[in-house]
Image (cartoon, helix red, strand yellow):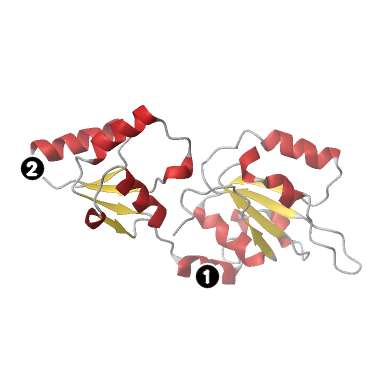
Amino acid sequence: MAIHGYSTCDAWSALAWCRLHHRKAILLSDSKYDDMPRLGLKEWVKQRLVSQYDAALCAGKPHRAYLQQLGMKSEQTFEGFDVVDNDFFWRGAEQRGETQPHTFDARLESPEPFFLVSAVSYTKESGWLAAILYPIPPRPGRDRRGAFAVETGYPRDGPERNALENLVRSEGIQGVSFPGFLQIEQLPIYYGLASLFYTPSHQDTWGWL
C-alpha cells in the first residue's frame, strides 16, 4: 500500500492495517529537513513511525536524505514521487489562453510586457516585496507595466496580501496585480505571456530535485 505522508490519522490507520495484515507499506514523502524547525521529541516520534515502512518514494535528493536521517536505509528510499507534466505547460503557454479566454484575467490582454512572480503564498518569507518594486521598463510611448503576483500553493491568500496591496497603493507602484491562488489549468497562460519569471521564496518544499 502506498501511503501519502506519516502525520495524519489516515496515514496511521493505513500503516496499522498494513502491519496487521502483513502487507508492504510504501511511504510517499516530500518533506525535507529545512522545511521548518525540527524539534527533538517530534523527530523521535517520526523515527518510530518511519521505521514501520518498508520503503519510500521521495520527491528528490533532500527529501530522501531526510528520511535516511530519520532512520531509513538508502536501499529503502527512491526518488521520483513529485513530477511535472512539461508538455501540458508547453502547450498551454503556446496557446496563450486562446481556447478559453473567459477563464483568464482580462488584464493579460494588454500588449505591455510583465513579469510573473510565483510563490506558495503571500508571506514575508516569500520575498514578494523585491519583485514588486522592480517593474519592467516601459516600451517607447507605452505605459509602464509591472508584475502579476500569483499564489500557487494553497487555495487561500497568505497573511501579507493586504499589506502588500496597501504598499503598492501607498508607493504609487503601477501595474501590479494580485490574482491570488490559481488552479493549474490557469497557470500556462501566465507563463506563456510573461517576459520574466521570478520565484522569490526563501525555501520551497517541492522545488528541490
Q: Residue at x 84, y 59 (%)?
A: 144
| Label 1: which secondary element | helix
86 above or below 67?
below
Q: Which residue is mark 1?
A: 90
47 above or below 140?
above
| 10 Å crowding of disc 1: few (<14), some (14-19), many (20+) | some
Q: Position of residue 133 (x, y in %)?
A: 78, 50
The one nearer the camera, 150 or 42, is 42
Question: Which amino acid lies under the numbered mark 1 shown in the image of this protein?
Answer: Trp
Q: Residue at x 8, y 42 (%)?
A: 22
Which of marks 1 and 2 precedes in the sequence?
2
Does residue 57 appear anywhere in the picture?
A: yes
Does residue 122 appear anywhere in the picture?
A: no
Q: Position of residue 186 (x, y in %)?
A: 56, 56
| 10 Å crowding of disc 2: few (<14), some (14-19), many (20+) | few
The one nearer the camera, 83 or 59, is 59
The one nearer the camera, 88 or 126, is 126
To which quarter of the image does residue 31 belong? Answer: top left
Q: Residue at x 74, y 39 (%)?
A: 165
Q: Position of residue 158 (x, y in %)?
A: 60, 37
| Label 2: which secondary element | loop
For this orientation, the residue located farthest to the left is: 21
Question: Which amino acid lies under the numbered mark 2 shown in the image of this protein?
Answer: His
Give the side of residue 16 with respect to residue 131, left or right.
Answer: left
3 above or below 148?
above
**Which image quarter holds the C terminus?**
bottom left
Give yes or no for contact between labels 2 and 1 (Cβ–Cβ under 8 Å): no
For this orientation, the residue located farthest to the right is: 141
To which quarter of the image does residue 99 belong? Answer: bottom right
Q: Which residue is mark 2?
A: 22
Give the side of residue 163 with respect to residue 138, left or right.
Answer: left
Q: Residue at x 70, y 34 (%)?
A: 162
